[in-house]
Amino acid sequence: MNKYSEIEYEIFSRLFILNEFSEDNIKKLSAIKVGIIGIGGIGCPLSQYLVNSGVKELTLVDGDIVERSNLNRQILFNNDDVGEKKVHVAKRKLQPINNGCKINVIDENIYSKNISSLSNCSIIVDATDDWEASKFLNKFNLEKSINFLYVSALRHDVQVILFDNSNNNEHLCLNCIFPNKADVDLPRCETVGISGISAGIAGLIAAQKILNLSLNLSEETNILTVFDGKKLSIENIIVKSKHICELK
């Protein structure tokens, strides 16, 4: 288990004095390993707040380079980073927050030959904005019994849901509630746009859900959190599916 150093206890001193951070929960926090697929408008704030919250191991997966069109919402990047690989820039920006955090990078998009690198994760986050990747990740996490967090932000709207794949008795997965077979007709950020603020809020909600689940702070399993940026409204919807899932 990764223990916190004296410097880390100083960094996280205002966090660890919260009532929820008992000695047991601090130990649990130190053992969390998070894989983040997609270091974009959601992955950037998510990774930053996980490091800021004491998570000690992240794996960042993205094959893209930084482009100027990313800068309005991908808050780890600036004009000086344009043309560089996102994962390498992200690690360079995140590491100084806490040198005790292990940050692994995979500078490729996720696919069958590199996904095994995520097998030791406690939870894998899909922040890809790519339906084929989402389906692929959903199936992998089911097979490996890894908890799966699906995050989507589009226009001003956010959807976040966490699937507890350690509970094999009650199957509910991404395919149960979104049984889309194809990607072609689904709207994407590059075609309909996205609010940088809403993307950031999606990352923050995802970070809090990871801590809520990992430290038993509140119930998060199979609860769809929906946020409307223009109305500043947030709803938590308990999800049940009558769809006969082909992955069950």
Image: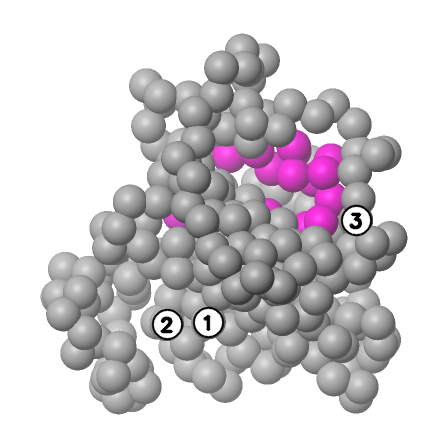
Instruction: Give the residue type at disc 2.
Output: Ser
Is residue 190 visible to us here?
A: yes
**Quarter that holds the N terminus:** bottom left
Tell me the residue that label 2 is attached to: 53
Residue extending furthest toward the front: 231
Q: How many residues crowd mark 3 within 10 Å: few (<14), some (14–19), many (20+)?
A: some
Alpha carbon of mark 1 to alpha carbon of mark 2: how far? 6 Å
Q: Which residues are magenta?
A: 120-141
Q: Please report whichever mark, 2 or 3, sits nearer to the chain's N-terminal start.
A: 2
Quarter-wise, where is residue 21 in the image? bottom left
Residue at (51, 34) in percent of width and height? 141
Residue at (32, 19) in percent of width and height? 169
Alpha carbon of mark 3 to alpha carbon of mark 1: how far? 25 Å
Alpha carbon of mark 2 to alpha carbon of mark 3: how far? 30 Å
Instruction: Give the residue type at disc 1.
Output: Tyr
The tag on residue 188 is 3
Q: Please report whichever mark, 3 or 1, sits nearer to the chain's N-terminal start.
A: 1
